[in-house]
Amino acid sequence: MDMVERIPELIKNGRRSFLISGGLNKEYTIPWKEYVGQLSKMKKEHPIRYNFHVGPVVKEEDINTLKELADIVSFDVVGNEETMIEVYGEDLHRSSIKSLELLTKNGIKVVPHVTIGLKAGKLSHEFEALELLESHGLKTVVFLIFIPTAGTAYEKTTPPAITDVRKVFDRATNFRKILGCMHPGGAYRRNIQGMALSLGFEAIVQPIVPTIKKAEELNLKTAYFYECCGFLL
């Protein structure tokens, strides 16, 4: 992560796309509106793309700006109220569904993200999240997998069982699937990436050497992409 002010320098160094993200403010949105002027100026002056990670709350008044600036919007989909309340500290479930509908009905390209094990490393909302995507006609999904983070309420928990991850992957048979950047390392990563290969995922972010070798053994057609995975969908 870096600051918006450094984007011009990054453009000079060859970067051509940027994830606009950050922490949530009191309105439960990413404070991207503070930087609209800078972001708009840079996009007019350079052939760059933006992926906006907007948070669970999107307001109708923001839609025109997002249509102008966002090439894609990454949107975290939480499947039920209980998980939303525990993780976000407030019931934003209806607001998040309304935000998702607002984005899609206005023709903004949404890249849904579903975090497996979001609630303390246990399955809680994932199947409902996939049902929600289907009900809104969305057939693509980026899967993330919970990683315990020091200094948070879940720091002493563990990632979801690999067998549970497999259950979610199996449910998503009719989706175009990407294994996103957030998934645990070590042997866990090796197992998950191998599973994703065998289940026909279209992309794996940060593949490790055993994954690359396995893809070669399976004679899969591969290519490397050096931008945010959301631009692939």
Image (cartoon, helix red, strand yellow):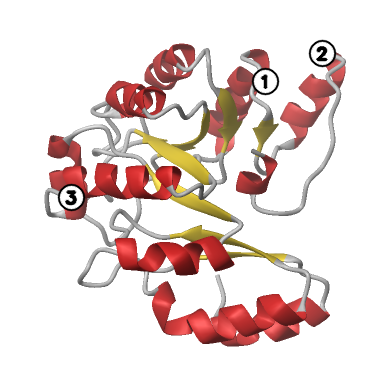
Q: Are marks 1 and 2 in contact (CB under 8 Å)?
A: yes
Q: Is residue 77 visible?
A: yes
Report, in whole angstroms, how far the alpha carbon at label 1 lies from the one at label 3. 34 Å
The answer for how far apart the CA atoms under marks 2 and 3 are is 43 Å
Quadrant where the N terminus sits is bottom right
Q: Is residue 233 left or right of residue 164?
A: right
Does the residue at mark 1 contact the one at mark 3 (Cβ under 8 Å)? Answer: no
Query: Which is more foreground, mark 1 or mark 3?
Result: 3
Q: Point out the tag, 2 or 3, that comes first from the N-terminus.
A: 3
**Residue named by callout 2:** 218
Neighbour class for label 2 at 10 Å: few (<14), some, many (≥20)? Answer: few
Position of residue 106 relative to residue 41, above or below, is above
Task: Identify the residue at image location x=12%, y=48%.
Answer: 91
Label 3 sits on residue: 92
First-in-chain label (1 vs 3): 3
Q: Residue at x 56, y 30 (%)?
A: 187
Q: Nearer the viewer, residue 123 or 25?
A: 25
Which x, y percent locates residue 166? 46, 16
Residue 122 picture quarter: top left
- Identify the disc placed on residue 197: 1
Q: Nearer the viewer, residue 62 or 158?
A: 62
Q: Secondary structure at mark 2?
A: loop
Badge 1 marks a residue whose secondary structure is: helix
The residue drawn where x is 70% and y is 78% is 44
In what quadrant of the picture does the C terminus appear? top right
Which amino acid is tagged 1? Answer: Leu
Left or right: residue 99 compared with residue 139? left
Q: Residues within 10 Å of mark 3 (few under 14, many from 20)?
A: some
Between discs 1 and 2, the one toward the N terminus: 1
